[in-house]
Amino acid sequence: MNEVKELLSYIVSNLVEFPDQVTITETEEGDTIVYKLKTAQSDMGKIIGRQGKIAKEIRVLAKALGQRNGKRIQVDIVD
Protein backbone atom coordinates (compact mmCIF):
# COMPACT_ATOMS: atom_id res chain seq x y z
CA MET A 1 0.00 0.00 0.00
CA ASN A 2 2.73 2.38 -0.99
CA GLU A 3 0.09 4.67 -2.55
CA VAL A 4 -1.47 5.40 0.83
CA LYS A 5 1.89 6.12 2.44
CA GLU A 6 2.79 8.50 -0.40
CA LEU A 7 -0.58 10.26 -0.11
CA LEU A 8 -0.20 10.67 3.65
CA SER A 9 3.36 11.92 3.26
CA TYR A 10 2.31 14.47 0.64
CA ILE A 11 -0.64 15.82 2.63
CA VAL A 12 1.10 16.00 6.00
CA SER A 13 4.36 17.44 4.64
CA ASN A 14 2.44 20.29 3.03
CA LEU A 15 0.55 21.08 6.23
CA VAL A 16 3.43 21.27 8.71
CA GLU A 17 6.21 23.77 9.33
CA PHE A 18 8.91 21.08 9.73
CA PRO A 19 8.26 18.49 6.97
CA ASP A 20 11.63 16.82 7.56
CA GLN A 21 10.39 15.65 10.99
CA VAL A 22 7.38 13.79 9.59
CA THR A 23 7.63 10.01 9.94
CA ILE A 24 5.07 7.49 8.77
CA THR A 25 5.31 3.88 9.86
CA GLU A 26 3.25 1.09 8.36
CA THR A 27 2.27 -2.06 10.24
CA GLU A 28 -0.18 -4.81 9.41
CA GLU A 29 -2.55 -5.99 12.13
CA GLY A 30 -4.72 -8.80 10.84
CA ASP A 31 -6.64 -7.57 7.82
CA THR A 32 -5.94 -3.89 8.60
CA ILE A 33 -2.94 -1.81 7.62
CA VAL A 34 -2.14 0.79 10.30
CA TYR A 35 -0.25 3.97 9.46
CA LYS A 36 1.20 5.93 12.36
CA LEU A 37 1.95 9.60 11.72
CA LYS A 38 4.49 11.35 13.88
CA THR A 39 5.70 14.92 13.56
CA ALA A 40 7.21 17.73 15.58
CA GLN A 41 5.16 18.57 18.67
CA SER A 42 4.64 22.14 17.44
CA ASP A 43 3.09 20.82 14.20
CA MET A 44 0.67 18.41 15.86
CA GLY A 45 -2.17 20.94 15.90
CA LYS A 46 -1.79 21.57 12.17
CA ILE A 47 -2.36 17.90 11.41
CA ILE A 48 -5.29 17.53 13.80
CA GLY A 49 -7.02 20.81 12.98
CA ARG A 50 -9.88 22.44 14.81
CA GLN A 51 -12.09 19.85 16.42
CA GLY A 52 -10.10 17.16 14.58
CA LYS A 53 -11.48 18.07 11.15
CA ILE A 54 -8.19 17.81 9.25
CA ALA A 55 -7.31 14.50 10.90
CA LYS A 56 -10.76 13.17 10.05
CA GLU A 57 -10.40 14.14 6.39
CA ILE A 58 -6.92 12.60 6.19
CA ARG A 59 -8.41 9.35 7.50
CA VAL A 60 -11.30 9.51 5.02
CA LEU A 61 -8.92 9.92 2.07
CA ALA A 62 -6.67 7.08 3.24
CA LYS A 63 -9.63 4.75 3.82
CA ALA A 64 -11.07 5.55 0.39
CA LEU A 65 -7.78 4.74 -1.31
CA GLY A 66 -7.52 1.54 0.71
CA GLN A 67 -11.04 0.45 -0.22
CA ARG A 68 -10.21 1.01 -3.87
CA ASN A 69 -7.41 -1.52 -3.42
CA GLY A 70 -9.43 -3.91 -1.24
CA LYS A 71 -7.61 -3.12 2.05
CA ARG A 72 -8.75 -1.78 5.43
CA ILE A 73 -6.75 1.28 6.47
CA GLN A 74 -6.36 2.91 9.88
CA VAL A 75 -4.46 6.17 10.42
CA ASP A 76 -3.18 7.00 13.91
CA ILE A 77 -1.58 10.29 14.87
CA VAL A 78 0.93 9.73 17.68
CA ASP A 79 2.87 12.11 19.91
Image (cartoon, rainbow, N blue to C red):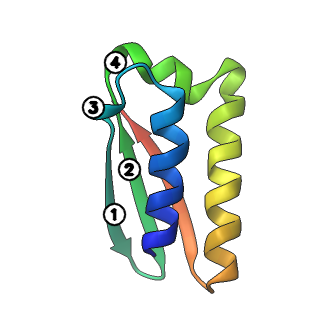
Which corner quadrant of the image does residue 42 belong to? top left
Amino acid marked by disc 2? Lys
Which corner quadrant of the image does residue 57 belong to? top right
Q: Secondary structure at mark 3?
A: helix
**Is disc 3 surrounded by few (<14), some (14 to 19) or many (20+) residues within 10 Å?**
some
> Where does label 1 land, which residue?
26
Q: Secondary structure at mark 4?
A: helix
N-terminal-most mark, 2 or 4: 2
**Is disc 1 surrounded by few (<14), some (14 to 19) or many (20+) residues within 10 Å?**
some
Q: Are marks 2 and 4 in contact (CB under 8 Å)?
A: no
Please give the count of numbered marks on the rendered protein.
4
Amino acid marked by disc 3? Gln
**Residue farthest toward the top in the current orientation of the protein:** 42
**Is disc 2 surrounded by few (<14), some (14 to 19) or many (20+) residues within 10 Å?**
some
Query: Residue sitting at 57 percent across and 81 percent down?
Result: 71
| Vertical position of residue 74 compared to residue 37: above or below | below
